[in-house]
Amino acid sequence: MLRYALGRVLLAVPLLFGLSVLSFVYVRLIPGDPVTAMLGVNSNPTVVAQLREQFGLDRPLLGQYGDWLAGVMRGDFGVSFRSQMPISTIIVDRIPATLQLAGAGLVVSLLIAIPAGVAAGMRPGSRLDSLITSATLFGLAVPAFFLGTLLMLFFSLKLNLVPSQGYVPFADDPAQSLRLTVLPALTLGLAISPYLARLTRSAVLETAQEPFVPFARAKGLAPRKISVGYVLRNALPSLVAALGLTVASLMAGSIVVEALFNWPGTGRLVTGAVTERDYAMVEALLLIYGGLFIAVNLACEIAQSLLDPRVRLT
C-alpha cells in the first residue's frame, strides 16, 4: 500500500510541473496585457514601457517563468498587477468563502445523487429508472447560471424565503451565514448532482450484477439491506473514484455561482483577473485550482485502493 501511494505521489510531481508551464504559457496567449487593461489602448507609450519594465513583462519569457516558479515553490505567487497586493494574501482571504460554498454544494449533491443513483441502479429499466435518467439528462443540459437565476427568482424574490446576495463568515453569524449559503449551495449541488447520479447508477448497476446479490435475495434479505449493506458498500470504491471526477465540475461551477450570487470567493477572483488581464493572479489561480484537482484525485485513488486492494494491481 505504501509503495502504491508513494508511486502516485511521485506521479503527481511531473503533473504539477506541467501544470505550471501550461498556466504560465496560457495566460500569455490571452489577447492584451495588464498594462493595456490598466491604462487603455490610447495610453502614453513611454508610460506603458515603464510599467512593463516595472512588472517585468519586458524580460524573456523563460526568465519570467523561472522567477515565478521559484517564488511559487516558496509560497510566494507574486503581486497582483491590478491591486498591487500580495496574491497569497488575497487568495487566503477568499478561501474560507469558497470552501464554505464548495462544501455545502458537495453535501447537497451527495444527498441528491447517491439515493437517486442507487434507486435507479437497483431497478434498471423500471419507471423510476427512466424518470431518474431523464431528470439527470435534463439536469446536465441546464446551465448553472440559468438554474441559479430560476432559484433566485422563485425562493428569494417571489417567496422571500432566503436572501439572494451577500456573504457573512460562519464564525461571525452562523444563522445568517447559513441563510446566505442556501441558494448558492443549492444551485451548485443541483448543477453537479446529475453527473454524480449517473456515475452512481453505473457503479451500482455493475455491482448489482455480481453473484452475491442474487444469493442475498435468495436468503430472503430485505431489499434495503441488500442495496445498502451489499451493493452500495461494494460499489463504494467506484463511487470514491467518481467523487474525484466531480471535483472539476465543482470548481468550474463555483466560479459561475460565485459571480451570480455575489459570493466573495476565489471564483470571482478568476473572472476579475481574466477581465483585467492580471497575469500573476490568473497564473496563481490556475495553478491552485489544477493542483487542488490533482490532490483530490490523488487522495481518491489512495482511498479507493484502501477500499479495494485489487486497484493496486492495475
Image (cartoon, rainbow, N blue to C red):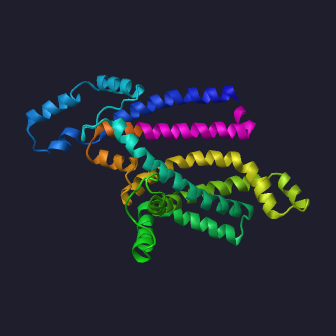
In percent of width and height, residue 85 lies at 28, 37
Q: Nearer the viewer, residue 270 or 172?
A: 172
Q: Residue at x 70, y 33 (%)?
A: 312
Q: Is residue 250 left or right of residue 46?
A: right
Q: Residue at x 64, y 30 (%)?
A: 5
In percent of width and height, residue 241 lies at 63, 45
In percent of width and height, residue 139 lies at 53, 64
In percent of width and height, residue 284 lies at 37, 36
The answer to whether residue 103 is above or below residue 279 is below
Tell me which secondary structure the magenta stretch mostly adopts. helix
Quadrant for residue 32, please give it: top left
- Magenta stretch bounds: 287-314
Q: Nearer the viewer, residue 124 or 279?
A: 279
Residue 288 is covered by the magenta coloring = yes
The answer to whether residue 214 is above or below residue 236 is below
Q: Is residue 178 left or right of residue 201?
A: left
Quadrant for residue 75, please give it: top left
Quadrant for residue 9, please give it: top right
Q: Quadrant of the N terminus?
A: top right
